[in-house]
Amino acid sequence: MHTFAVARAVHGIEPLVATEIRRSRLGVVRGLRHREVWFEATDEADLLSLRTADDVLLAGAVVDGIGPGRSALARLAEAARAVDAVRLARLGGGVRGSRGGLEVSASFVGRRNYTRFEIEDAVGAELARSLRVPYHSRSEGGRPPQEAMAWRVTIEGEQAVIASRLAGRPLHRRPYKTASIRGTLHPPVAAAMAKLARLDGAGTVLDPCCGAGTTLIEAHALAPHLRLLGFDHDPAALSAAAANARAALAGGPSAGDGGSPFGWGVADGGGIPVPDGGAERVLVNPPWGRQVPPRGMLAGDLGLLWREVRRVLAADGLAVALVHDDIPPGFALEEAVRVSLSGRHPVIAVLRKGRG
Ligand SMILES: C[S@@+](CC[C@H](N)C(=O)[O-])C[C@H]1O[C@@H](n2cnc3c(N)ncnc32)[C@H](O)[C@@H]1O
């Protein structure tokens, strides 16, 4: 039996998630919504291999006629009662549900005369009855236990979907990310940057402000043949990057020759220790001064970073950068994907060296 699945994503990268689903033959895409890609999953597909998605869910019901009025709550409860919750729980490794009970998290687009907590409680009570497990409500500020089976209700326009999470934790919470830093990048966005960088033809990929190493680790997951160079001004960030890379290598496919494909070093982005044209790809999420201040040479002028990126980028290379303001000078913009991240709307910019 084909399974109707929902991939959740950062707003802006839904089309990239759809492309990943198609290219990885995980299923047939049926449609895109705000932060969602709906698809018919291929039998036996490894849906947990999706890297650009935040989460993957199995849909139990699509419910039409969910307007802004409070009658929507009864309609959602009725739809939840009809969900084959036992089958979905089994597909999702159901044991979790019976041990930890279940929780529901709801979200919607547009104004409604009911709250997310009312949706959660209406749907949660019915699912819990079908599964004969306790329901953990958030409405009184409760915190469901970690092992609770996770369900989601999302509503856009007049259409709702009731779905259960396939894995024990969201896909964006990568097992390799054992160490973090302030301003570290959301891994599915780093994966989207790596996909946009078209890594197939590349040899060396550089991140001159690598922080906890997310961009390079995601690049490695897509293309294990790459040589990956990460620099940062902050030695603590590099320790985090090295620890995360070790965890990724321990949990992923082998690098081939037994040596690590990663190289890490303390360096200033205003003077990157790489020869001219030495990197085929640059992935970078620079210190914009919002969460992380630019330090060293970049403190006075972030333009020095772009001059260095231009210098080290191979003639036919690509730089993929998370850009908050203008497109950096000296580059030609090939593609721009605007994303919504923590209330901000930066652009993933795919850049080539401009002339001059
Ligand atoms: C937004 S964070 C990068 C986060 C990273 N992509 C990750 O996933 O963890 C920016 C990084 O730039 C570094 N940085 C600040 N000034 C720098 C400089 N002059 N040269 C190199 N790195 C610098 C910070 O230490 C920080 O790790």
Image (tube, rainbow, N blue to C red):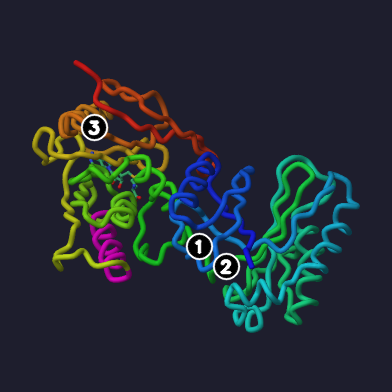
List the single residue furthest toward the right: 71
Is 60 on the left-hand or right-hand side of 251?
right
**Is 313 placed above or below 162 here?**
above
* Amino acid on which disc 1 is placed: Leu
Q: Earlier in the sequence, mark 1 or mark 2?
A: 1
Quarter-of-image position of residue 320 = top left
Contact between marks 1 and 2 (CB within 8 A): the answer is yes
* Amino acid on which disc 3 is placed: Leu
As helix, strand or loop, the secondary structure at mark 1 comes to: helix
Q: What x and y, as percent, mark residue 70?
A: 89, 51
Is 337 on the left-hand or right-hand side of 80?
left
Front of the two marks 1 and 2: 1
Image: magenta residue range: 237-251
**Is 71 placed above or below 301 here?**
below
Give the residue pinned by disc 3: 305
Instruction: In the rendered structure, find residue 166 and report the number of the disc placed on it.
Output: 2
Q: What x and y, as percent, mark residue 10?
A: 53, 46
Q: CA distance from mark 3 to mark 2?
A: 41 Å
Give the residue pinned by disc 1: 47
**Is 64 placed above or below 86 here?**
above
Tell whether position 201 is magenta. no
As helix, strand or loop, the secondary structure at mark 3 comes to: helix
Quarter, ligand 1: top left
Q: Earlier in the sequence, mark 3 or mark 2?
A: 2
Q: Residue at x 22, y 43 (%)?
A: 202
Q: CA distance from mark 1 to mark 2?
A: 8 Å
Question: What is the quadrant of the C terminus in the image?
Answer: top left
